[in-house]
Amino acid sequence: MTGSKVLDRDSDAGKTRVCLFATVLRADDVRLFHRECKSLVKAGFDVHVVICSDLSGTVDGVHFHAAGPANNRLHRMLVKPWIVMWKALMIKAKIYHFHDPELLIVGFIMRWALSKRVVFDMRESTARQIMGKEYLPRWSRRVISLCYRVIEKVCLHGISVVVANDRSAEEHKGAYLVRNFPEVDEELMANAMDMSERLKSPLVVYVGGVWESRGALVYVELARRLKERGHKFRLMIIGQHGADFGRQLTQMVQEVGLVGMVEVTGHVDYLKAMQVVSRAVIGLSILRPIPNYTFCLAGKMVEYMMCGTPVLASDFEHWRPYVEGEKVGRMVDPNNMEEIVNVCEQMLENPDELAAMGRRGMEAVRRKYNWSLEFTELLRCYDDLLKKAS
């Protein structure tokens, strides 16, 4: 993040002070920082963020307060929530807005013991996410998931809930639906490469968390098979990954002879990642059919659309209106490697349809899948909270 300066605590006098806090998220998290915080600053709020990092100061009008990085997962889950809560309370905000499920108990205490106005930002279905945790013994996942549902139901009583997908809004009555759509970037869209230029040096891209469940190994295998069929292209896998899995992925790239054709970049700044996407011929989102992914929309698909990049995605029912309904890409069975390769090849061999898909994606984002429309619902949530007695 750039543009840091010394924090001036009196610079936002007279504005409604809000505090967003998290223990897991990065300081430059797209939804937290680029969408919510920046939009709140533009809307006239005094915006503060407490997060587990060393960042302290003001970035793009957002005041960051360092809670220090966590030493490990256990430290983050058991110790950091209380440090983050304490620092958040020192800010004396009118609204406290938290993101991570492991802060549910903190949110409950702030609401009922300290009488604060509290918002929980529910990005995904955590109960379903637990069902897909490969590091948990299979027999334990259902038990842990059910326990989480009970804790969630108790802790969310009296707390305003913001959800990021349509199905969660159906499941949590009274929640505010604020989908994680991109903010329309007209400069990025205007400078997006024409499809005919993209096809001169074809780039296939994935952006997001780089895990096996999100298709990382599938993407490398796709590249291997396309190379065998004589296609010349590059594949970029962009996003944060664990050290062990990163080594596994890099080793696989080497073993199948794709060094120079496949690049695993690690974390890249959001705007730079979108610039890469705006030069790509296909954006990949071939996630495994685990409960959380089939339930929630992968927001990166809409970001591909904004960049005029056709989508190749898993054939999940909830995703179909976006991909096939808007005619911005193709859908495949994520467990059928032959189908994935064949459909990707068909896309690469049909430049006119690729160009049409890209144009339709941009138009759909301008018309209805954009952050400006979603942000009005977050403002309504805040307005409703501010009208209530503390």
Image (cartoon, helix red, strand yellow):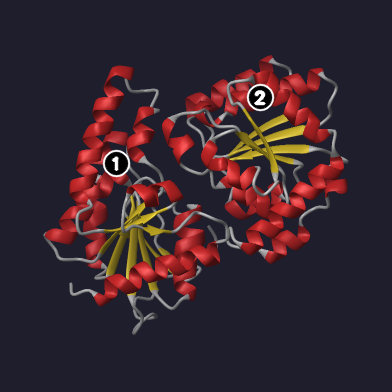
Tell me the element at label 1: helix
Residue under the image location 54 percent in, 55 percent down? 181
On screen, residue 156 above or below 243? below
Q: Furthest residue to the left?
A: 113
Q: Which mark is residue 3?
A: none
Q: Position of residue 246 (x, y in %)?
A: 54, 27
On screen, residue 49 above or below 163? below
Q: Position of residue 88 (x, y in %)?
A: 26, 61
Residue under the image location 21 percent in, 52 percent down? 106
Q: Nearer the viewer, mark 2 or mark 1?
A: 2
Q: Nearer the viewer, residue 367 or 159?
A: 367
Please, what is the three-letter code of the amino acid marked with disc 2?
Val
On screen, residue 356 above or below 45? above
Q: Furthest residue to the top?
A: 255
Q: Position of residue 2 (x, y in %)?
A: 55, 61
Q: What is the CA distance from the residue labelled 2 to the residue labelled 1?
A: 33 Å
Q: Is residue 258 visible?
A: no
Q: Nearer the viewer, residue 243 or 101?
A: 101
Q: Which mark is residue 220?
A: 2
Crowd class of label 2 (few under 14; some 14 to 19; many from 20; radius 10 Å): many
Residue at image mark 1: 76
Q: Position of residue 280 (x, y in %)?
A: 75, 43
Q: Is residue 155 visible?
A: yes
Query: Going from the N terminus, do you reach mark 2 or mark 1 first?
Result: 1
Q: Nearer the viewer, residue 322 or 311?
A: 322
In screen coordinates, is 126 left or right of 148?
right
In screen coordinates, is 215 left or right of 36?
right
Quadrant where the C terminus is found in the figure: bottom left
Please, what is the three-letter code of the amino acid marked with disc 1?
Arg
